[in-house]
Amino acid sequence: MNIRDIKWVVKSFNELTSRELYKILHVRQEVFVLELQGYYQDIDYQDQKALHLLGFVKTELVAYTRIFPQNIIFSKSASFGRFLVVKEYRKEGVGHELMEQTFQVVEGLFEANSIEIEAQLYLKVFYEKYGFIMTGNSFINAGIPHIIMKKDL
């Protein structure tokens, strides 16, 4: 698989087709609930406030994140979450490309000076590669250790 094979799409909640929304919910459950065994309420009424960045190879959703302007999740920062790459496409640079695409969306569509995220602790080094800095103590969310990280733009 070549990174260039991925077609990136950004949509608001209302622009998503029912098929796209079903694929999003499917991969989120597959990764966060089944694979990571994080039992939590995934459908949290935040999707309606987010932009959705989807990465497709043909018709298969292989990467995804939802992106928020400031004043939704964090008062002074944009944010993103539910950041994922399906298992079969990991270790091929898809996560790095998803991060670059996320930055393009934030910088192109929002007027934020920073991005804050609730990151899974085991991904701290991944996010540090992109300039994120841990800003507090770890905490448990859905049974998984998390940290708040921030990146100035």
Image (cartoon, helix red, strand yellow):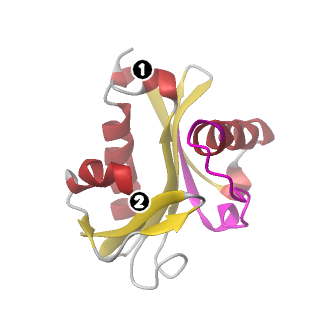
Q: Is residue 133 above or below residue 3?
A: below
- Residue 59 position, x and y percent, is 62, 22
Q: How many tags in the picture? A: 2
Residue at disc 2, secondary structure? strand
Please give the name of the residue rendered at 22% of the width and 56% of the height, measured from the top-left corner: 128
Residue at disc 1, secondary structure? helix
Q: Where the N terminus falls, by quadrant?
A: top left
69 in magenta = no
Q: Is residue 78 above or below residue 34?
A: below
At label 1, which amino acid type do we have?
A: Asp
- Residue 3 position, x and y percent, is 35, 24
Task: State which region is magenta.
Answer: 34-54
Inspect this view and state whether residue 132 appears.
Answer: yes
| Sooner in the amino-acid sequence: mark 1 or mark 2 | 1
Q: Nearer the viewer, mark 1 or mark 2?
A: 2
Return the residue at label 2: 119
At label 2, which amino acid type do we have?
A: Ala
- Which residue occupies the extreme bottom position in the image? 75
Pick the front one: 12 or 102? 102
For residue 35, side relative to residue 117 (left or right): right
Please give the name of the residue rendered at 52% of the width and 42% of the height, measured from the top-left corner: 64
Tag 2: Cα neighbours inside 10 Å, few (<14), some, or many (≥20)? many
Return the residue at label 1: 5
Contact (CB < 8 A) between labels 1 and 2? Answer: no
- Residue 32 position, x and y percent, is 59, 45
